[in-house]
Amino acid sequence: MKKILLKFIVYFFLMLVCLEGLVRVLHLYTEDPPRFIDSYGVEKRVPNHTGYAVTGNRNQNYSKFSINNSGFNSHREFTPSKDKIEIAIIGDSFIEGFHQDFDDSLGNKIEDELKNNIEVYEYGYAGYDMANQMHLIHAYKEDFEKIDHIVLYLNYKSDLGRSEYTPNTGRIAMLSSLLFKLRDNIKLLSYTSKIGILDSFKKMLGENNKDISNTIEGEEAQIEKEELFLNNFKQLVKLYGFDNNKTHILLDSRKTSASFLNYCKENGMSYIDFSEAFEESDSPTTLVYDKHWNNNGRELIASIVSEYFITRSLDTVH
Amino acid sequence: MQNMFVLIASYLFYGLWDWRFLFLIFGSTVVDYFIGIAIHRENENKKARKFFLWGSILFNVSLLGFFKYYNFFADSFLDMFQLFGYTIKSTWTLQIILPVGISFYTFQTMSYSLDIYYRRIKPTRDFLSFATFVAFFPQLVAGPIERASNLLGQITSKRTFNANQTIEGIKLILWGLFKKIVIADSLAPIVDDIFANYGMYPSTTLILGVTLFSFQVYGDFSGYSDIAIGTAKLFGIELMSNFKFPSFSRNVAEYWQRWHVSLSTWFRHYIYIPLGGSRVSKLKSIRNICIIFLVSGFWHGANWTFIFWGAFHALAFIPVFLMGRNTIYKNTVIGENSMLPSIKEVGQVLLTFGIVTFSRIFFRSKSLTDSFSFIERIFFNFSHEPYVHPSGYRMLDFYILIIVFIVYEYIIRKDERNPFSFKSKYLRFFVYTLIILAMLLFYDDGVNRSFIYFQF
């Protein structure tokens, strides 16, 4: 009995070592560049990290990321100046773009379409909502004063949940804890955690990831929610400001409430609506295994954004 | 003490699903325990023996009839009236929960009474052992359906720890998990999608769907059986083999000697042979074959699709029987004396696999209408388009997986109890590691993991 137990432990340990090796060699794990909150209270990635994000239900999507000096995934450094024309695109994981190689990003595609040495800065960070985005502009006021145009990506259903930005220190502290460091360094653990094998253990430990964002239902509740979202937006505008001349909202009008769109129109806030292009597209616009834009989706967004600026005679605005 | 522990574990295991149905198992145990003793006591009184035997059969069949078939008969009865133009409001159908494993443990307890009746065994007076025999948790919910002559004897004897048996058990559990997680569960979403939307897919996709279902159901059920056999080994118990590489069968008769062996054996021993088996006239033998296949189909579920599935197998079996080829492959495997199978064998295997896979259209479809529409689309709407799963599964992964699985099963085809029979311990270790890696690669968080045969 003792012998078999010992043998079992040895086999188990050796197998873990082998599996760790195989997971590393086959790069099954995804790399998540470390995050932090800077002195301005902005949550972002630790600068100068490169690696591969692995996504897809069979880990079929490898894409290289490169975090620049400013802490965002981009093919270029952000060096705003009065001498150049720059467009900043701010948003969540759709803009952060870990689903494509960093040098084939949305920003890159817009630059290609616009030409004329216009620089596009992608301030994308998974989880950024409107509060994050507007606080970022406010916090880096000097930089954004030099930037000619700002595009805020609004995912209406999830981005207007709060009226003020507060840094998520709890999450950053959790991600820096020993347990998470272990998870990130032991690739087998990182991989098994990603594919959900450890979910039952997490449940046992009492981790509750219940999503409460969709708990409000019914027509009345829907109206209430729309009112809340609009009020939150108004509060954010009041708190952080909104330069109508250079700020534009990128949105899908199919998923955005009429009251919000009307408010924008009434207050001279311009928005770029990509719903029509997506609806008319013959090929899918999102990845098959999740809802992020695929290459076709990004191409469409890039051409809509560039067309928008071309028709508004971008280089003569300022 | 050992049996007390196993019995408590078994009742706890079953009770965690639904404690109310523990009374059903206990009832079945008590009835067959006393009936077994009664049959044996009436050694000379043939009538009394028969009376008690029928008591056991009626009791168990009634349990099955009520919990599994009541709604089927009620609905069929109403449908029959509708056929003649009468419409009866359906108030007869009841909301009955099907107790998990009822088809398995009722057959097991019935076999006990039948074996005593046929004087193959003597009844046990040890109620605890008998209750453990009925409720032994590794095989309680989906078999193998054990006969008392094999299992009860092991349960009544004291068991001691055996290192080799434990290692064999762990290996079988690992292999079973591989078949369940990697083969069955990973194919499930593809099969589900194709069968749910068969009206939208071209014929080649439907053929793909039913072929993958063949592998899914095999991986699911044989995986469960291996886990059950392996777990039983950890308790010092040897259960019978339930699957002997049925995919390599050379005719339909051989297939039934390799697929769900415990059920086939049950039907052969307790229905086919008592009816005269093949020792009666050809016509009667054909009748007997039809009976066991129809009963087997009906055993699987209260749905006409299963009855058609059984009938289809009877039709496929009868020609083999008439040609006298139903037992010729009984003790051999494909490529018996060579490394590779002959071309003739490959042809036979492909034909058998094709027939069996075709029958699974009935097995998998929700209704007969669906089955026939599915078949109609295959034959009369022939077209091809590469299959793309809505969730974006990369199909190449699955094609490679199936090929590797077939090749590996071919390598180990001679011993279903030892899936890792390589002499080199390094090679064994390599295979174990690859198997666990495959489990990690194909693990799908969103898949419903319940076993297909739990519903029977």
Image (cartoon, coloured by chain):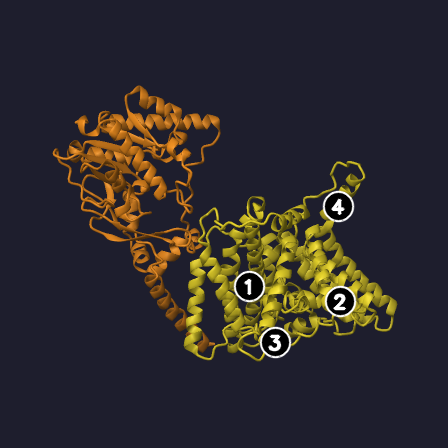
Badge number at residue B76: 4
Give SS at disc 1. helix
Label 4 in the same subunit as label 2: yes
Contact? badges 4 and 2 (CB < 8 Å): no
Task: Please identify which colour was used for chain B in the image.
Answer: yellow
Along the polypeptide, which appears first: circle 1 or circle 3?
Answer: 3
Give SS at disc 4. helix
Q: Amino acid at mark 4?
A: Ser
Image spot of residue B128 (x, y percent): 66, 67
Q: Which residue is mark 2?
A: B270
Q: Which chain is orange?
A: A
Most foreground residue, B285 or A154 = B285
Image spot of residue A6 (x, y percent): 42, 75
Nearer to us of marks 3 and 4 is 4
Q: Amino acid at mark 2?
A: Tyr
Q: Is residue A203 visible?
A: yes
How far apart are the alpha carbons under marks 4 and 2? 28 Å
Left or right, B241 with respect to B314, comes to: left
